Image (spheres, helix red, strand yellow):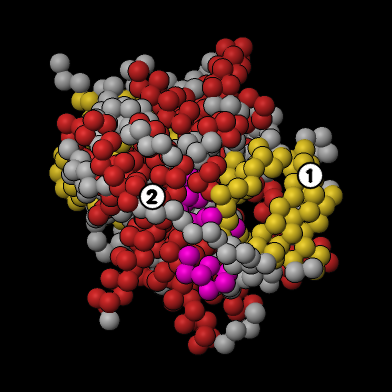
Amino acid sequence: MNDTVIAFHNFGFQYYEQSEPTLYDINLEIHKGEKILIAGPSGSGKSTLGNCLNGLIPNAYRGTITGSLTVDGIDTKNASLFDLSQKVGTVLQDSDGQFIGLSVAEDIAFALENDCILQEEMKERVKKISQIVDIEHRLENNPHDLSGGQKQRVSLAGVMVGDADILLFDEPLANLDPKTGKVAIELIDEICDSGKTVIIIEHRIEDVLHCPIDRMILISDGRIVADDTPDNVLAQNILTGHGIREPLYLTACRYAGIDITADMKPASLNTLDMSRCAEKLLKWHESNPDMAEEPERKPLLEINDITYSYDGKVTVLNHVSATVNEGEMISIVGKNGAGKSTLAHILTGFIVPDSGSVVMNGTDLSQFTVSERAEYIGIVLQNPNQMISQTMIYDEIALGLRIRKVPEPEIEERVMRIMKICGIDEFKKWPIAALSFGQKKRVTIASILVLNPKVLILDEPTAGQDYRHYSEIMEFLKELNEKGQTIILITHDMHLMLEYTGRAIVLCESEKLADQKAYEVLCDPDLSERANLKETSLFELAQKAGIPEPEAFVERFIRYERKVKDNETETVLVQSA
């Protein structure tokens, strides 16, 4: 009996608006009950592949199809969106584009209502699923009023509550805090155990591999370049070359001179053969010196005793105080709904706190309007659709400069420089509507970076970015920071926090839980547990290798990786010269 539920045969797709195909000669079979990870850089075609599966192509996005694709016996070329939605349940990358109901409960129940499920059973199933994804306390809220991570949980619940046999997750971890992301992967694993076929499109390879994956498919430039077990793909050492970050523990092993092979079971730190790693890891650790002390910095931004509640009942921020120093790049981390984005909106003046103050260089910023405050603090929001107001990409990035009456020749020079850094210079004459969610994110980052505010806040700056674009954006932010730009990053990306920020402010349950060195946060199991963070795999690797100072190992890895990146940048500059 043939258990193939998805079959691509010489499949290709080209959008009508594009001059070249997005997908070329795809030959792929997915079997019933398999759990598949599809990875690839932004623009590689992986989301297009997903849209072919769920029927958005060709029903919503038009183009030319070659070859064939069948989903559970249905030829998708002529199938309706409704027919395919009965076969494939989808969690979209952009949660806002998926919401239907006026409340969280209504949205989760939408599929059940379509199937005419009795109301009592419907309520019970909604309650059960909402508890699983930890959103049961928000059932009466409008989904559009939730934080990015909370929205993602609602989307997960909405697809989990239905009966589709094939589930497609398009970057399900993009807006989730590390612990919730871990729970989400465990939930997806449980779904697969129930016999459903699961396809995960995701950049965060290490997080997805927290639970076993049957196959890992790597897509680059519209073609499948690898289709094998995770152990075999990771052993090939090809991820970074295709814009995907490999698990950190493997990078540490490679720095230590360890040759990673498939028989070492590298897909998980729990299965990795440490007998072939420990000695070299210890030797590498001992050969790297301790870090010199950080220089003293002058305070720039004072956050004084901030308290805020949206409804006068539930406190979102409770007497939060912190200092941001001149020239720092710091991170604000913590559980979804802990108040991170709310604090950012208070700093920019979008929200007025119930009590407390925000002071920069002795000046209370409450006296300024939101537009005046933008000269002090700029922000890139989590959802790019909330920031975009222009039709064309160039005009969107240039808008702030034009409002400020900057001469057009200077605008063009600054806009093109920022577009190149953000990896979107080739899209100068493109409409924003033609971009993916991740590409829109880069446009909004560029639109604020071009203004060069005194303090720059970025809310999840790398969400939806592949490793190459992630690195380009973060290296540009690092360059700005080294020139004196003060930067605050709100992030769920623990590697970003480790590599680029010296200090982390941890928020949990509306209060400041910690303010300390970034690597110390992720080497503290109790703190990570309380704040919904996740200990870095580097810490666990050091423990498994018997290294007596695992915290020092993490710090030395981050510093060593920084040196590697600086050397690579210097090499590129020399070659280009």
Is residue 247 shown above or below 74?
below
Q: Residue 80, located in which quarter of the rendered image?
A: top left
Residue 266 visible, this angle: yes
User: Which residue sits at x=56%, y=49%?
Assistant: 517
Along the line of sight, the residue nearer the viewer: 456 or 187: 456
The reply to whether the magenta stretch includes residue 496 is: yes
Q: Give the residue at x 33% y 34%.
A: 545
- Report which residue position mark 2 lands on: 557
Give how far across and how far down residue 567 sits, in percent.
Answer: 32, 66
Depth check: 263 or 396 in front? 263
Q: Nearer the viewer, residue 487 or 300?
A: 300
Which segment did they paint magenta?
Answer: 478-502
Q: Amino acid at mark 1?
A: His
Asked if residue 554 lies left or right of residue 316, the reply is left
Which circle marks residue 319 in the picture? 1
Q: Is residue 486 visible?
A: no
Q: Is residue 353 shown above or below 192? A: below
Q: Specify few, some or many for label 1: CA neighbours under 10 Å numbering under 14, 14-19, or 20 or more.
A: some
Quadrant in the picture for the N terminus: top left
Disc 1, SS: strand
When asked about the image quadrant of residue 108, the answer is: top right
**Sequence-wise, which precedes: disc 1 or disc 2?**
1
Look at the image and tell me in which quarter the C terminus lies.
bottom left
Q: For this view, does 205 lie left or right of residue 408?
A: left
- The crowd level at tag 2 (other Cα within 10 Å; few <14, some 14-19, many 20+) is many
- In the rendered structure, find residue 270 and report the number of the disc placed on it: none
